[in-house]
Image: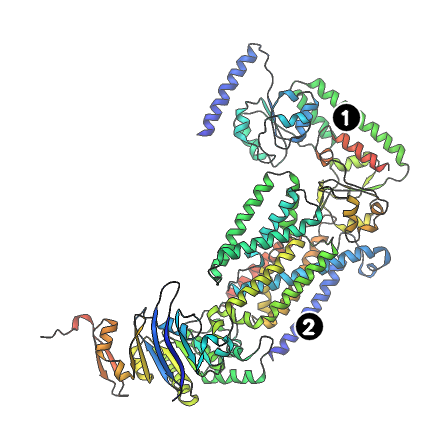
C-alpha cells in the first residue's frame, strides 16, 4: 500500500521535473519561445541553456542528497552540506588563486583543493583515536569555517579589487557553464556519490536512530560514518568548485521531501534527487529572467525562496505536534 | 543445558578507566538473568561489552562457543538483540518502519523487505500489543508505547539472546509489570534467553531465574534470588539497612526498605 | 578619549597654521590621497611633490610608489594619515565612507570624488585643482583631455564608416561582468566608434549572461583583467559555444590593455580610449 503511494508520488515528481526542465530551457535573458529554441540560429543559446539545466539538475540532486546524509549521520536536522568546511575552503582556494594571478582555468582546481583541505582539517581536529564523535565534528566544522572565512576576508581586504570579484562568484553561486569537461567530471562524481549514499540507505535509516542502535542492528557505525562523510565531502567540494555556494538547498529540500515521502532513506533519496533538481532549475530560471539582461546569482534566489519555505515547514511541524 | 554466552576474564571501560573487572559469567540457554547493583557498579558497561558495543580491554566473550571478537557484526546481531534504556528518535519514522529495522541483521544492504520480513514485524507488533500503533509516527507515542515498540523491534530480529538495559525505569508500575510479563512470556514460550538490568530489586526477584549482583565492577554474588537477595548481601553492596522476607504470593524474597529513623539498634 | 586628544592636537596645529597664513608665510600644502584615480590627477596637475601620503594601490606614476603608504583602498590608516598633518585628504566612493566620516569628525578637510562619466570627471578635476591652488593647471588638463578625446573620436569616425562594430568588454569571467549604460566604458566605446553590446543594461557595472553575448555576437572582445599571461584567444575559444562568435572567428580578442587605464577615473582614460580605438581599427 505504501509502495503504491510512493510510486504515484514519484510519477508526479518526474512530471514536475519535466515541466521544470521546459521552463528552464525557455527562460533566459534572451526571449526565445520554446518552439523556436532548437532552430539552427538559436542552437548555441539552446546548448548553453541545456548545459545550465543539466548543472542545475546535478547540483540540486547532489546538494539535497548530501544534506540528507549529513543530517542522518550527524543526527542533526540543521545539518547542511557546507557544515564541514567545504564552502569556506573552496572560497579561500579561489581567492588565493586570483590573488596570485593564476590562469582562469585553474580556478576550479584551486577551489576543489581548498575544499578538500578544509574538510581534512575539520576531520583531523575532531578525530579521537579511530572514532569521529559527531558533536566534535559539528563544532570543528563551524570553527574551521569561521577561521578560514576570516583569513579570506583578510586576503581580500589587502588585495586589489580583482580578489573581490573572485569572492562574489563563490559567495552567491552561479550555474553558468564555460568548461564542458569540468561539467562532465563534476556530474560523474556527483552521480557516483549519490549512488553510494543510496546504497547505504539501510545504514542511514539505522544510524539516524542512534549510533549505538545501529551497532545493535549489525551496522558498523564508524565505518559507515567515514564512508558517508567522505562521499558527501567529495560531492559538495566538486559542486562548490564549479558553481560556488548555493545555500538552503541542502538544508530545506531534505525536510520538504521528508514531509512528502517520509524519512525512510530508500524512498527519501530518490525523491530528493528529483525535488532538489526541480527546485534548482526553477530558482535558476527566476534568477535569469527577472532582471534581464542582468542576472541575480542563484544563491540569492535559493535564500529568498528557501527561507520562507523553511519557516512554513517549521510552523507546519509545530502545528502537527 | 547448553551455555549460550560466556565471558572469560572480561574487563573494560571508557577512555582509560576500567569499570568492569575480570568478570566470568555463564549464561545458560533459556535463562532469565537479572543484573542488579548500585549506580556505577558497571551494569550498563557490562552489557555493552557483551553486545560488541564496547571493545573489551581484557578478556573475551563467547557466543555458542565462538569468540565474539572474530564474529562479524551482522552475524552477531542475528542472534543477539539489545533494548536500551530510552531512545530519542529525531526523525518521524512510523512504528512499522522502526520495527522493520529489526530485520536489518537478516538483510543485505541492497535488499528490500520481503513479505516474510513484514510478517515477522507484524507478529512482533502483535506480541507487544502495538499493532494498533502501526501507522503512527514514533514521536507521537507515550514513553510506555515507545518502549514496547523498541522491544518489538528487538523481537523482530528473532534473537536467541535478548539484552535489556533498565527497560522499565521510566515507566509507571502498570507498564513495568506489563513489559516484564511480556518478556517472561517470550522466555517461556519462545525460548528466548533474557538478560535484563533492573533497578528494582523486587521486580528482579519476581521475574528472574538467576540474579547477578555487581559491586564496583566485580561479581559480588550470583545465583538464585533466594541466595543472592539476602539482607547481608544487600546491606554490604547498597550500604543501607533492609529487611528481606518471603513474598506470600510467589515465595520469592521481598526486600523491605528501612528508613533511617526506624533502624533498631541491637541491645 | 583618544579621539578627544587627537582632536585637540588637530585644533592646536590648525591654530598654528592659521597664524602662519596670517603672517604671510609660504608653506607648501600637504596632501593625502587614498584614491588611486585622484593620485594620478594630482600628479597630472603638477602637485606630485605636495603628496605626503597615498594608498597602497596608488601605483601610477612611478613616483607615487615612493610616497609614504597610508593603508589599503578600503581601510585607510587613519592614525597614520593624522600623523602626516595633511591640509586635505582626497577620498572616493562608498567603501571609504566610514573613514571619511572619521576624518570629518576630526576636523580634517576631505574631498570626495566619485565621477560616473566624463562630464563629472572634468568638473571633479576643476574642483580638485582649485582646492590645491592650481586652477590654471586644472583647466589646461581638462582642455587637453577634451581635445585629445575629440581627436581620437574623429579618427574613429573616419575609420569606421557606416556600421559601428559591436564591442564586448569583460571585467571578470566568473561571473561575467561588464559595463552598461552610464559607465565610462560605455562612453569610451561610443567615442571609439563602437557599440557596447551591454548598453541596454541599466547599471554601470553588472553581471551579464552568456546568452546575451551570443545573442549580440560581438565583433571585438576586450578582457580587462589580469590574466596571468594567458593567450586571450585561447582562453575565450575554449569556453563552450564562444568559438562561434565573430570576435573569436576574426581573432579580435584582446587582453593587452592595462585595466587601470579603462577603469580609473583619471587622465589616463584618454589612453584607454585610444587603446580601444586602435583595436577597433584593426
Quadrant in which the C terminus of chain C appears: top right
Q: In this view, does C108 lie above or below A145?
A: above
For the residue pair C61 and C98, the one nearer the viewer reads as C61
The subunit carrying tag 2 is A
If the image is split into quadrants, where does the N terminus of chain C sit? top left
Q: Residues under labels 2 and 1: Cα distance?
A: 68 Å
Mark 1 residue element: helix
Residue lying at 63% horizontally and 34% vertically, measured from the top left: C93
Q: What element carries label 2?
A: helix
Assess disc 2: are there few (<14), some (14-19) or many (≥20) residues with their C-alpha within 10 Å of its C-alpha: few
Q: Mark 2 points at which residue?
A: A11
The answer to whether A152 is drawn above or below residue A193 in the figure is above
Which residue carries the number 1 mark? C145
Q: Where is residue B124 in the image (x, y as percent from the top left)?
A: 48, 83
Look at discs 2 and 1 and give the one toward the viewer: 1
**Other residues around mark 1 within 10 Å, as few (<14) / some (14–19) / many (≥20):** some
* Apparent side of residue C204 relative to residue C25 in the rendered image (left or right): right
Residue drawn 67% across the image and 54% down it:
A242
Q: In which quarter of the image is residue A309?
A: bottom right
Amino acid at each position: 500500500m505504501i509502495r503504491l503511494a510512493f510510486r504515484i508520488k514519484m510519477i508526479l515528481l518526474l512530471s514536475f521535473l519535466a515541466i521544470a526542465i521546459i521552463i528552464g530551457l525557455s527562460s533566459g535573458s534572451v526571449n526565445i519561445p520554446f518552439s523556436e529554441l532548437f532552430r539552427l540560429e538559436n542552437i548555441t543559446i539552446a546548448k548553453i541553456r541545456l548545459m545550465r539545466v543539466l548543472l542545475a539538475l546535478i547540483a540540486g540532486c547532489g546538494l539535497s542528497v548530501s544534506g540528507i546524509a549529513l543530517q542522518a549521520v550527524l543526527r542533526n536536522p540543521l545539518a547542511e552540506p557546507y557544515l564541514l568546511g567545504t564552502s569556506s575552503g573552496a572560497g579561500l582556494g579561489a581567492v588565493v588563486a586570483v590573488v596570485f594571478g593564476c590562469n582562469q582555468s585553474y580556478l576550479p582546481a584551486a577551489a576543489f583543493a581548498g575544499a578538500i583541505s578544509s574538510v581534512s582539517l575539520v576531520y583531523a581536529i575532531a578525530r579521537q583515536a579511530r572514532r569521529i564523535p559527531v558533536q566534535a565534528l559539528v563544532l570543528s566544522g563551524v570553527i574551521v569555517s569561521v577561521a578560514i572565512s576570516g583569513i579570506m576576508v583578510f586576503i581580500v581586504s589587502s588585495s586589489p579589487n580583482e580578489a573581490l570579484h573572485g569572492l562574489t562568484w563563490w559567495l552567491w553561486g552561479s550555474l553558468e557553464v564555460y568548461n564542458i569537461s569540468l561539467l562532465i567530471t563534476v556530474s560523474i562524481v556527483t552521480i557516483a556519490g549519490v549512488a553510494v549514499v543510496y546504497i547505504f540507505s539501510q545504514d542511514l535509516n539505522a544510524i539516524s536512530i542512534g549510533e549505538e542502535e545501529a551497532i545493535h542492528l549489525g551496522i558498523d557505525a564508524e565505518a559507515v560514518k567515514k564512508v558517508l562523510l567522505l562521499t558527501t565531502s567529495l560531492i559538495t567540494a566538486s559542486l562548490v568548485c564549479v558553481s560556488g555556494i548555493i545555500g538552503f538547498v541542502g538544508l530545506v529540500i531534505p525536510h520538504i521531501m521528508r514531509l512528502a515521502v517520509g524519512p525512510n532513506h530508500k524512498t527519501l533519496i530518490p525523491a530528493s534527487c528529483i525535488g532538489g533538481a526541480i527546485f534548482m532549475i526553477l530558482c535558476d530560471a527566476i534568477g535569469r529572467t527577472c532582471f534581464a539582461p542582468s542576472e541575480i546569482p542563484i544563491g540569492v534566489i535559493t535564500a529568498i525562496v528557501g527561507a520562507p519555505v523553511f519557516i512554513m515547514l517549521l510552523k507546519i511541524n509545530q502545528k502537527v505536534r | 543445558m547448553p551455555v549460550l554466552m560466556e565471558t572469560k576474564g572480561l574487563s573494560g571501560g571508557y577512555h582509560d578507566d576500567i569499570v568492569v573487572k575480570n568478570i566470568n559469567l555463564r549464561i545458560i540457554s533459556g535463562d532469565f538473568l537479572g543484573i542488579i547493583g548500585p549506580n556505577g557498579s558497571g551494569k550498563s558497561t557490562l552489557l555493552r561489552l557483551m553486545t560488541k558495543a564496547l571493545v573489551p580491554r581484557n578478556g573475551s566473550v563467547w557466543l555458542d562457543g565462538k569468540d565474539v571478537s572474530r564474529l562479524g557484526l551482522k552475524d552477531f546481531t542475528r542472534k543477539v538483540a539489545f533494548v536500551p534504556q530510552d531512545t530519542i528518535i529525531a526523525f518521524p519514522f512510523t512504528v512499522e518502519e522502526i520495527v522493520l529495522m529489526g530485520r536489518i541483521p537478516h538483510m543485505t544492504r541492497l535488499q528490500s523487505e520481503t513479505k516474510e520480513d513484514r510478517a515477522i514485524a507484524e507478529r512482533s507488533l502483535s506480541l507487544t500489543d502495538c499493532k494498533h500503533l502501526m501507522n503512527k509516527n514514533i514521536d507521537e507515542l507515550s514513553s510506555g508505547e515507545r518502549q514496547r515498540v523498541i522491544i518489538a523491534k528487538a523481537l523482530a530480529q528473532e534473537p536467541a539472546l535478548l539484552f535489556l538495559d533498565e527497560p522499565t525505569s521510566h515507566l509507571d508500575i502498570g507498564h513495568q509489570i506489563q513489559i516484564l510479563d511480556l518478556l517472561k512470556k517470550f522466555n517461556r514460550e519462545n525460548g528466548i534467553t533474557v538478560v535484563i538490568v533492573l533497578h528494582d530489586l523486587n521486580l528482579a526477584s519476581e521475574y528472574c531465574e538467576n540474579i547477578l549482583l555487581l559491586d564496583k565492577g566485580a561479581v559480588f554474588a550470583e545465583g538464585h534470588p533466594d541466595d543472592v537477595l539476602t539482607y547481608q548481601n544487600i546491606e554490604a553492596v547498597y550500604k543501607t539497612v533492609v529487611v528481606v522476607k518471603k513474598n506470600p504470593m510467589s515465595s520469592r524474597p521481598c526486600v523491605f526498605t528501612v528508613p533511617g529513623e526506624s533502624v533498631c539498634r541491637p541491645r | 578619549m583618544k579621539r578627544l586628544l587627537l582632536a585637540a592636537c588637530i585644533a592646536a596645529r590648525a591654530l598654528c597654521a592659521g597664524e602662519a597664513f596670517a603672517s604671510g608665510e609660504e608653506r607648501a600644502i600637504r596632501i593625502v590621497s587614498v584614491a588611486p584615480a585622484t593620485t594620478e590627477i594630482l600628479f597630472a596637475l603638477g602637485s606630485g611633490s605636495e603628496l605626503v601620503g597615498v594608498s597602497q594601490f596608488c601605483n601610477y606614476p612611478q613616483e607615487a610608489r615612493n610616497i609614504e603608504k597610508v593603508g589599503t583602498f578600503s581601510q585607510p590608516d587613519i592614525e597614520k594619515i593624522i600623523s602626516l598633518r595633511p591640509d586635505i585628504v582626497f577620498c572616493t566612493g562608498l567603501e571609504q565612507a566610514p573613514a571619511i566620516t572619521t576624518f570629518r569628525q576630526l576636523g580634517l578637510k576631505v574631498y570626495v570624488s566619485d565621477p560616473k562619466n566624463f562630464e563629472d570627471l572634468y568638473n571633479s578635476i576643476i574642483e580638485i585643482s582649485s582646492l590645491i591652488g592650481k586652477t590654471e593647471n586644472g583647466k589646461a588638463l581638462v582642455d587637453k583631455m577634451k581635445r585629445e578625446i575629440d581627436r581620437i573620436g574623429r579618427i574613429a569616425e573616419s575609420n569606421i564608416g557606416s556600421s559601428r562594430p559591436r564591442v564586448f568588454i569583460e571585467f571578470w569571467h566568473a561571473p561575467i561582468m561588464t559595463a552598461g549604460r552610464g559607465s565610462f566604458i560605455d562612453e569610451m566605446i561610443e567615442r571609439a566608434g563602437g557599440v557596447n553590446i551591454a548598453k541596454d543594461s541599466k547599471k554601470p557595472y553588472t553581471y551579464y549572461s552568456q546568452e546575451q553575448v551570443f545573442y549580440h555576437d560581438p565583433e571585438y572582445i576586450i578582457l580587462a583583467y589580469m590574466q596571468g599571461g594567458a593567450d586571450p584567444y585561447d582562453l575565450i575559444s575554449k569556453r563552450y559555444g564562444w568559438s562561434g562568435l565573430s570576435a573569436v572567428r576574426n581573432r579580435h580578442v584582446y587582453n593587452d590593455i592595462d585595466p587601470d587605464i579603462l577603469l580609473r577615473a583619471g587622465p589616463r582614460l584618454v589612453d584607454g580610449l585610444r587603446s580601444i580605438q586602435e583595436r577597433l581599427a584593426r
